[in-house]
Image (tube, rainbow, N blue to C red):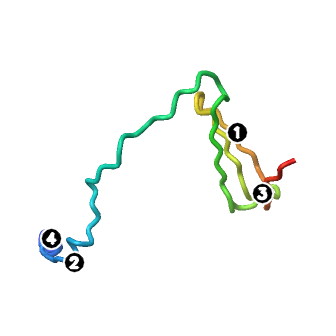
Amino acid sequence: MYNIVRRYITSYYTCRQAKALYETYNGLLKPLPVPDRRWKDISINFVIDLSESGGCINIIVVVDRLSKMRYLIACPDIISTAVA
């Protein structure tokens, strides 16, 4: 069955034309520089719409890129930013 489907797809013009090219050149990857001390370079992610626990349904995840130490900060229903 696999060979029949494979042969059909490779011979069908529309399937060959719509097939994504996975061999395209995307350029060179440029790695981020390694931080020289802890908490100099961090990443922040938001995890939202979780089950409610203690009145909070969102989590802010702060991760140090060097030590991989992380802080999880529980947040209420609304997260907003304000410039003071």
- Residue at coordinates 83% horizontally, 52% vertically from top-left? 82
Q: Quadrant of residue 73?
A: top right
Label 4 sits on what residue type?
Answer: Thr
Query: In this view, which residue lies farthest toward the top?
Result: 36
Query: Badge 1: few (under 14), some or many (20 or more) residues near its Cα, within 10 Å?
Result: few
> Disc number at residue 14?
2
The amino acid at mark 3 is Ile
As measured in the structure, the alpha-carbon distance from the residue carrying label 4 to the one carrying label 1 is 51 Å
Q: Earlier in the sequence, mark 4 or mark 1?
A: 4
Read off the residue under disc 4.
Answer: 10
Sequence-wise first label, 3 or 1: 1
The residue beneath circle 3 is: 79
Mark 4 or mark 1, whichever is nearer to me:
4
The residue positioned 79% from the left and 61% from the top of the image is 77
Q: In the rendered view, tell whether residue 29 sits above or below residue 53.
A: above
Residues tagged 3 and 4 counted as in contact (Cβ below 8 A):
no
Q: Is residue 36 above or below residue 8?
A: above
Where does the N terminus fall, quadrant-wise? bottom left
Amino acid tagged 1: Tyr
Q: Which residue is mark 1?
A: 71
Q: Secondary structure at mark 2?
A: helix
Report helix, strand or loop for mark 4: helix
Amino acid type, mark 2: Thr
In the image, residue 61 sits, relative to residue 78, either above or below, namely above
Query: What is the x, y in percent for residue 2?
Result: 16, 69
As measured in the structure, the alpha-carbon distance from the residue carrying label 3 to the one carrying label 4 is: 51 Å
**Which circle, 3 or 1, is nearer the viewer?**
3
Spatial CA span between label 2 and label 4: 10 Å
At label 3, counting other C-alpha atoms closer than 10 Å, the crowd grade (few under 14, some 14-19, many 20 or more) is few
